[in-house]
Amino acid sequence: MNSQTRATMDGAWLKKWTGGWVAPVLVSFALVGCASKVLKVDNPGEMLKTDEYDKQVKVNEIKLEPSGTYVKLPGPEPVAGAFKAVKKGKKTKFVAVAAPTPVPTPAVPSLAAAPTPVGKRQPEIEDSEGFIGRRPVKDPYRVGEKVTLEASYFGVVAGELTLEVRPFVDVNGRKSYNFAGTAISTSVFAMFYAVNDWFATYVDFETLTPYTYELHVKETKQLREARSIFNWDTMKASFWDKKVNAEKKIEEKKQEWTIPSHSQNIFSIAYYIRAFQLKPGKKLAIRLAHENENLIVTTEVLRKERIKTAAGEFDTIVTKPKIEINGVFKPVGDIFIWFTDDDRKFIVRMESKIKIGTIVASAKAIERGQN
């Protein structure tokens, strides 16, 4: 690999992409080196430990109980006929729950049937079509969904990227989406640069605003752990980043800054755009807070297009995101994202044009998740 190609695809280009709305883990393959193994050090977990994160965020799984089991959750008491599990020794008995005294409550219209309210929802810069408050009328996310994309450069497959929706979690007492992704290099590409990265971000079910993200990086030239927390009570974001470089030296960075309401993080925004009505001619604006910067991502919806991928043929909507800071667009290169033209809006193709060629990620497989 010549020096010109290396200069085109080094970490500086990756930083330009991460300044956009696509998560850095999706393009880790763009980094280039001359080694075939992931960097290894003694006690990497201890070296990269980030205690501040664990102290502020409590994440618990929301487990689905067997049929016939009643689980006490916040809210009104169950109606007659519901069951609760009573354990006696090694046996479990299901006991009917008596009906509570009814409390009159105002009628709540069905989300599916209710019209979109007149006027702008908060924040005002965002499009309101298809929303009731902060919730989309049609939820595009399903637990168990997984999109696998094959990433290539000059026709050579570099690795696989995944975007998935995992089971709901309880984050500091609130039901939250659990979005995650991975990037793994192929054995051939790993001869030049090995990648084994993953991320997770938790997003509030009601407000669609993120609480946290975590990034785990294992690559030829670095081991890295990054954490971010959005505290919506104080309107502050905290960011921790620890890295072990190729010389096995530890680099650490901490940041805290004030964020605007309803900001997304660099991982949640790729999912968040799916909640919007994508119609050609629209320009969608979304707040993005990342590493001490408050940005605006403006996504132009360009056209409809039918494309063919390894996962099948799809009717799609083609979009082009741009990054704005203090009213000025940042030069991040041409990036194009293809979403399926349906209620789910799966990402089935991504392109990023660089100085030499184009990085392409195309859908290899799609698991639609639970109904």
Image (cartoon, rainbow, N blue to C red):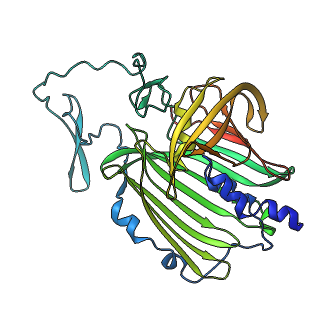
Can residue 185 be seen at all in this image of the molecule?
no
Residue 96 picture quarter: top left
Name which residue lies at 68% across and 78% down. 246
Q: Nearer the viewer, residue 191 or 116?
A: 116
Residue 275 location, x and y as percent? Answer: 52, 32
Residue at 69% from the left image edge and 48% from the top image edge: 331
Give percent across and percent down for residue 84.
22, 40
Q: Position of residue 163 (x, y in %)?
A: 60, 46
Among all residues in the image, which is located at the extreme left?
Answer: 101
Q: Is residue 51 above or below residue 165?
A: below
Residue occupying the far front of the picture: 327
Residue 77: image x %, image y %?
18, 34
Horizontally, is 28 left or right of 208 in the view?
right
Left or right for 261, reference 181: left
Q: How many marks?
A: 0
Front residue of this view, candidates 291 and 203: 291
Q: Name the quadrant of the N terminus.
A: bottom right
Residue positioned 25% across, 42% down in the render: 73
Residue at 26% in and 55% down: 90
| Residue 59 location, quadrant | bottom left
Residue 183 seen in the current view: yes
